[in-house]
C-alpha cells in the first residue's frame, strides 16, 4: 500500500514554504500598519458554533464540514472558516469590555470537504481580518483597502473588486419575499437544489452554479431593476434609507481612495451571517475558482453569540489562491527559488571534519547559516551537494590551504572564487551575508 496525502490536501516543500513565509510576512506587516493584532484560535470547535453562525442551509454546514464525535459524544468540527471562532474568542475573553473596538487578524488552516479541483482544497489556508465593535461604513472602506493592499504587496494587481449591500435583516426579509415571489413562476425550471432553497433560503439561489439557475437570475435582475429603491445597481437587495446611506458612504470612501469597484454584479455570499456591505475580489488567471478574497459586514453575529449589539466587518483571502495569482503576475513579489544565504563548508580531506565543525559553530554563533557533509564524501560530491542545496557559497577547507593560512571561498551565485585569510574568515562571511 502506498501512503499518500489525502485528496485536497498538500505538502509544502522548502521552496513553497519560502513563498508562504514571504506572504505571511507581508500580511503581518501590513495588518499591523493598519492597527490589527494577531489572534490564533483552535483548529477544532464545537459544531454548534458554525451551525448557529454560518446558517443551516449553507453548503458549508450541509455538506462540507469535517465533523466527528469526541469520546464524550460531543460534536466537534474542524473549523471551516475564521470569523465565527474569532467572534467567539472576542466574547470569551471579554474584549467587548476591555477593548470595545477590536481589530484582529489571523493566518491558518481551514477545512472544507469540497470536491477538490484547481484552487479548491479540503485543507486550505486563510489570512483574514475581523474588525469587531463598529457599525461605521469607514471601517468597511479600511478593510477593503487593506485587503487590496495585501494583494498588491504580494504582486497581485490585476483584480476586480465587486461590492454590494445585502441590507439589514429587515431589508433581507423584504428582499427575500420579493425574490421568492418573482422566482415562483419559474420554479420548475430551477435545479432540484434551488427548488428547495426557494422556500428555505432564497438567497442561496443567487449563488447557484447551475447554468439554468444563473440564466434565470440574470434575466430576473434585469427586469426587477426599475422596481427597486436603488435602481442604479443590479442588486436583488432592496435597501432602507439607513442601509442606502451606509452603502453610499462605502462607495464614496472607496472613490476618495481611488479604488476601482464594480457594484453592478449580482452576488450573494455563501454564508448567512452577512448584512449590509459584502465584497469579493477576483484575480486574473485563477480559472473557475477566481475569488481570491471575500468578506463583508456581519452586524448581528456578536449579539447572536450572546454579546452586546455590535457591528463588525472583515474578510479572508485564500492563501493558496493568492500564491497562484501571485505566480501568474509578472512582477510577483513572492521569491522564486534563489540561492540561499547559506555557506557549505567542504573538506578536502575527511579528517578536517573537526575543523569544519568548529568553523560552522563560529559562523552559526554569528548568525551565518552553515552546512557541512558528515559522510566523508569526495570534494566533488560535496560541491554537487552544495549546488543541490542551493547554497550561496562553498568554503573549501584543505590541508594545503590551511598551511598557507587561507580558505578558498567560491561564490556559487556570482561564479567567482577567492582566498580568504583564515583568521578573518568568520568576519568576512558576516560582512558578505549583510551586503
Ligand atoms: P469565504 O468566501 O468562504 O469567506 O472564503 C474566503 C476565501 O477563502 C475565498 O475567497 C477563497 O479565496 C478562500 N477559500 C474558500 N474556500 C476555499 C477552498 N476550499 N480552497 C481554497 N481556498 C478557499 C469566509 O471564509 C469568511 N469567513 C470571510 C469573512 C471574514 N467574512 C467576514 N470576515
Image (tube, rainbow, N blue to C red):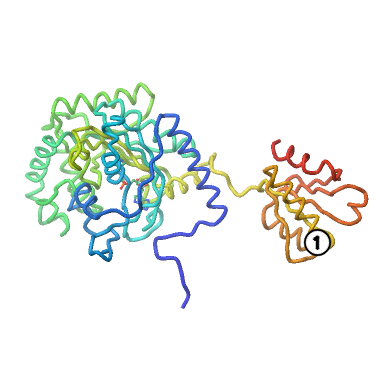
Number of marks drawn: 1
The quarter of the picture where the C terminus appears is: top right
Q: Residue at x 45, y 29 (%)?
A: 33
Res. 76 image quadrant? bottom left
Q: In front: 103, or 327?
A: 103
Q: In front: 30, or 209?
A: 30
Res. 182 image quadrant? top left
x then y, percent, for residue 135: 24, 28
Q: Residue at x 21, y 29 (%)?
A: 232
Res. 234 image quadrant? top left
Label 1: few (<14), some (14–19) or many (≥20) C-alpha neighbours in 10 Å: some
Q: Residue at x 27, y 45 (%)?
A: 84
Q: Residue at x 33, y 32 (%)?
A: 261
Indicate whether 416 appears above or below 276.
below
x then y, percent, for residue 8: 39, 61
x then y, percent, for residue 173: 10, 39
x then y, percent, for residue 247: 23, 28
Which residue is identified by label 1?
379
Residue projecting furthest to the bottom: 1
Indicate whether 26 appears above or below 12.
above
Left or right: 303 in relation to 251: left
Q: Secondary structure at mark 1?
A: helix
Left or right: 185 in relation to 220: left
Indicate whether 167 appears above or below 252.
below
Amino acid at each position: 500500500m502506498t501512503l499518500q496525502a489525502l485528496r485536497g490536501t498538500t505538502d509544502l516543500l522548502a521552496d513553497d514554504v519560502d513563498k508562504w513565509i514571504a506572504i505571511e510576512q507581508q500580511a503581518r506587516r501590513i495588518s499591523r500598519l493598519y492597527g490589527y493584532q494577531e489572534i490564533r484560535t483552535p483548529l477544532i470547535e464545537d459544531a454548534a458554533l458554525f451551525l448557529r453562525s454560518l446558517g443551516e442551509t449553507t453548503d458549508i454546514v450541509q455538506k462540507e464540514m469535517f465533523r466527528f464525535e469526541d469520546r464524550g459524544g460531543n460534536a466537534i468540527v474542524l473549523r471551516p472558516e475564521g470569523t465565527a471562532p474569532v467572534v467567539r474568542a472576542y466574547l470569551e475573553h471579554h474584549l467587548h469590555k476591555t477593548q470595545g473596538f477590536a481589530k484582529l487578524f489571523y493566518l491558518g488552516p481551514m477545512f472544507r470537504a469540497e470536491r477538490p479541483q484547481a484552487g479548491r482544497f479540503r485543507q486550505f489556508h486563510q489570512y483574514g481580518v475581523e474588525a469587531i465593535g463598529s457599525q461605521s461604513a469607514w471601517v468597511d472602506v479600511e478593510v477593503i483597502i487593506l485587503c487590496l493592499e495585501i494583494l498588491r504587496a504580494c504582486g497581485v494587481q490585476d483584480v476586480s473588486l465587486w461590492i454590494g449591500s445585502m441590507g439589514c435583516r429587515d431589508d433581507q426579509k423584504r428582499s427575500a419575499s420579493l425574490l421568492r415571489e418573482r422566482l415562483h413562476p419559474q420554479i420548475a425550471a430551477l435545479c432540484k437544489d434551488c427548488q428547495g432553497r426557494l422556500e428555505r433560503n432564497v438567497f442561496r439561489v443567487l449563488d447557484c452554479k447551475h447554468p439554468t439557475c444563473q440564466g434565470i437570475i440574470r434575466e430576473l435582475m434585469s427586469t426587477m431593476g426599475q422596481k427597486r429603491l436603488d435602481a442604479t445597481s443590479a442588486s436583488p437587495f432592496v435597501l432602507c434609507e439607513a442601509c442606502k446611506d451606509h452603502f453610499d458612504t462605502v462607495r464614496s470612501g472607496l472613490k476618495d481612495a481611488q479604488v476601482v469597484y464594480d457594484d453592478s454584479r449580482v452576488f450573494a455570499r455563501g454564508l448567512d451571517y452577512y448584512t449590509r456591505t459584502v465584497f469579493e475580489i477576483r484575480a486574473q488567471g485563477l480559472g473557475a475558482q477566481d475569488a481570491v478574497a471575500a468578506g463583508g459586514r456581519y452586524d448581528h453575529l456578536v449579539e447572536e453569540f450572546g454579546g452586546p449589539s455590535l457591528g463588525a466587518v472583515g474578510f479572508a483571502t485564500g492563501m493558496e489562491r493568492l500564491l497562484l495569482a501571485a505566480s501568474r503576475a509578472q512582477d510577483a513579489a513572492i521569491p522564486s527559488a534563489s540561492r540561499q544565504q547559506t555557506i557549505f563548508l567542504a573538506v578536502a580531506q575527511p579528517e578536517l571534519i573537526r575543523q569544519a565543525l568548529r568553523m560552522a559553530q563560529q559562523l552559526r554563533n554569528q548568525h551565518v547559516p552553515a552546512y557541512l557533509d558528515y559522510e566523508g564524501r569526495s570534494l566533488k560530491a560535496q560541491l554537487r551537494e552544495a549546488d543541490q542545496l542551493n547554497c550561496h557559497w562553498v568554503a573549501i577547507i584543505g590541508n594545503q590551504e590551511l598551511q598557507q593560512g587561507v580558505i578558498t571561498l567560491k561564490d556559487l551565485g556570482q561564479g567567482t572564487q577567492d582566498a580568504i585569510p583564515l583568521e578573518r574568515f568568520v568576519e568576512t562571511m558576516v560582512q558578505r551575508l549583510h551586503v
